[in-house]
Amino acid sequence: MRSKLGIGLAFLGAFFIGVGLLAQFWAPDKLEVTPLNVDNTTHLDGTAVLSGESQPIKAASTTHTNSEASTSDIAVWDNSTCVVIDLPDTPDCVSTDDPKGRLLSASVSTFATDRVTGLAVNDPDLLPPDATPREGLVNKWPFNAEKKTYPYWSDTLGKAVPAVYDRTEDLAGVECYVYKVTITDAPKEIAAGVNGTVDSTDEIYVEPLTGAIQNQVTHQDQKLEDGTPAVTIDLAFTDEQIQKSADDITTQIDQLNLVTKTVPLVTYIVGIPVLIIGLVLVVLSRRPEDEAPAASAEPNVGETTDVGA
């Protein structure tokens, strides 16, 4: 009976430990990948100084994964971004012939990234022929981001630029690594046929476990070739967007921590003692069955016992 109980406990303990090992070492590789069902719209607001006059502006950036074009290792993304002057009743985007002249910029693009590292992938078999080749990080950081410099894609320069770790900051209850991207005197076509330069600074707030961008604060100065100010833009996630992003990412963090940290801890705490107890019972139950019984203390036949009078 003791042997059967010991074997059962040993198997049960080994099972718990096995679950813990899978959760700790196998699950992260399966969970820490960009999903292929992303469909997000990010809202930003701020101001733009145009011809010396400050105007409220807003931007909407819609990004979704193309699951049919994506693979197990690479995510293909479709993105559309629109920036408009935020007059009353202005939608997220307007047409190029908007009678109120509210459209500042609009763009559409398709790109691909590695589902783990977040780095751009230029695979002609996955992307359309007119897709702009990209390099560096594009729309997210890698899982388990580090406090270091990463290459980050700049639409302004058409190449990757350094995104330098600057500090750690709490944003709506989420700990974020803040990276700075600085561009100085970069040539840019300010308007159709009008050349100039641009200076810009971006602060990108990244939740390090998932690599998700929680906020992006942009300041940009565009100047004509003679140095005359043309456009100054300040743009960042709206307060509502920051809170929504924080709520969404907190749920993801809790799910990841449950599988990769809590489950291993609990299974080890339960499994290791159960395994040890089971092994001990198995060892104790294996005493030789033919072991001789202890010697009897009864006197031998023929012995006499003196009895005092």
Image (cartoon, helix red, strand yellow):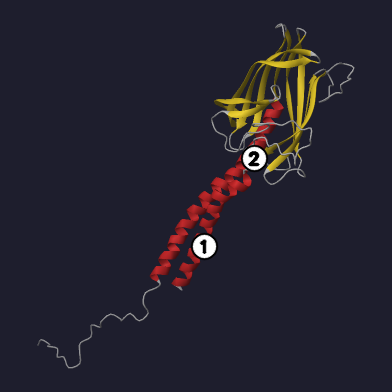
Is residue 172 visible to the viewer in this orientation of the structure?
Answer: no
Q: Earlier in the sequence, mark 1 or mark 2?
A: 1
Q: Could you say which quadrant of the image residue 282 lies in? A: bottom left
Q: Amino acid at mark 1?
A: Leu
- How far apart marks 1 and 2 lie (CA) works out to 31 Å
Q: Residue 166 bears which disc, if any?
A: none
The answer to whether 167 appears left or right of 252 in the picture is left
From this view, report whether residue 148 is shown above or below residue 15: above
Q: Could you say which quadrant of the image residue 129 lies in? A: top right
From this view, report whether residue 109 is shown above or below residue 302: above
Q: Amino acid at mark 2?
A: Thr
Is residue 222 visible to the viewer in this orientation of the structure?
Answer: yes
Which element type, helix, strand or loop, lies under badge 2?
A: helix
Label 2: how many residues lie within 10 Å, few (<14), some (14-19) or many (20+)? few
Q: Residue 12 bears which disc, if any?
A: 1
From this view, report whether residue 161 is shown above or below residue 23: above
Foreground of the two, 122 or 40: 122
Give residue 141's position: percent from left, percent from top. 62, 34
Residue depicted at x 48% and y 64%: 10
Q: What residue would you read off at disc 2? A: 251
Give residue 180's position: percent from left, percent from top. 60, 23
Which element type, helix, strand or loop, lies under badge 1?
A: helix
